[in-house]
Amino acid sequence: MDWGMKNRLSQVMPGGRCFFMAMDHGYFQGPTTGLEKPGETIKPLLPYVDALFCTRGALRSAIDPLNSKPIILRVSGCTSMVGKDLADEEVTTSVEEIIRLNASAVGVSVFIGSDYEKQTLKNLSQLVNACETYGIPVMAVTAVGKELEKREARYLALCCRIAAELGARAVKTYWCEKDFDKVVQGCPVPVVIAGGPKCETELEVLEFVHDGIQKGAVGINLGRNVWQNPNPVAMAKALRAIVHESASVKKAYEIFNEGKQKLESHAGRQVLQ
Ligand code: R5P
């Protein structure tokens, strides 16, 4: 592997593990709850994450270039929640723009099994062609659009393997309860766990992340389950412990509760003053 490629990968995956903060939701669903002002939402979480996953628009308008984290630029889009089909994506960003913004990596969605399978796989392949020239890693995102029921091991394994075969340096995919280890084992490049809709409880999030890491995933790309939580910093600390310190679910939940209590006692003091 070339020096530049290796160096960029190590920026976003220090020690081979990663906690990416997903904040790209606006690119297809507008001002998502909790992310109306992305800069304000993300700022307190920055110390706990390894990289930000965002579009060029959010980056320019909301992220301070002086005190940032490595950037994984979301470079596919051109569809919306209210449009005909979320899968009908194009690549939105040129390689010059990717370099100008000093992105450490890029992310592109593939919609395998959809009407736009070939188009989105071509998006991935062509992006790999362009980015490999400059040593920029491409992360494929195995997307399902609104068809959340597709998230089972056989389908996810197929998607991850295809994305890796086409040249993705990492693949982001959904965790699944059954046979997630088979998804990871069938993929020759690092697998990163995607978030998905907000879970009912914190414990549920910690459990699926812990299970995914145990089964071989190198890390997470989570958004709503962190910044839609009433205690996002406590949640980020707990997740970081699972990803980077191999913490158990019990330990991570303790970290979450400690963080939450600190915040509550701080708020209590403010009310008393
Ligand atoms: C998918 O690629 C999306 O754009 C998000 O990056 C991804 O869904 C992770 O965010 P969340 O944890 O909120 O689902």
Image (cartoon, grey):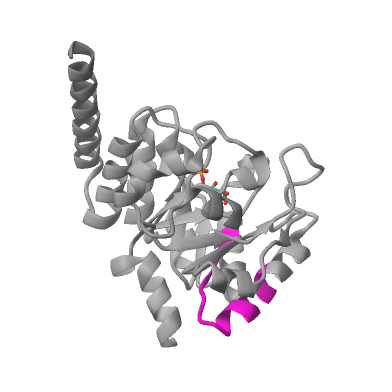
When the figure is inspected, residue 268 is found, relative to residue 230, above or below; the finding is above
Q: Is residue 179 visible?
A: no
When the figure is inspected, residue 138 is found, relative to residue 244, above or below; the finding is below
The x and y percentages for residue 253 are 24, 35
Considering every residue shown, the one lying at the far bottom of the view is: 2
Residue displayed at 23% across by 13% down: 271
Quadrant including the N terminus: bottom left
Residue displayed at 49% across by 70% down: 102
Residue displayed at 52% across by 42% down: 196
Q: Nearer the viewer, residue 88 or 106?
A: 106
In the image, taking residue 128 as reference, residue 44 lies left or right, namely left
Residue displayed at 78% across by 58% down: 116
Q: Is residue 14 visible?
A: yes
When the figure is inspected, residue 60 is found, relative to residue 36, above or below; the finding is below
- Where, by quadrant of the figure, is residue 76 drawn? bottom right
Which stretch appears magenta? 124-141
Q: Nearer the viewer, residue 234 or 92?
A: 92
The x and y percentages for residue 187 are 50, 68
Quadrant including the C terminus: top left
Considering every residue shown, the one lying at the far top of the view is: 272
- Where, by quadrant of the figure, is residue 239 drawn? top left
Q: Nearer the viewer, residue 14 or 254?
A: 14
In the image, taking residue 1 as reference, residue 153 lies left or right, namely right
The x and y percentages for residue 121 are 70, 67
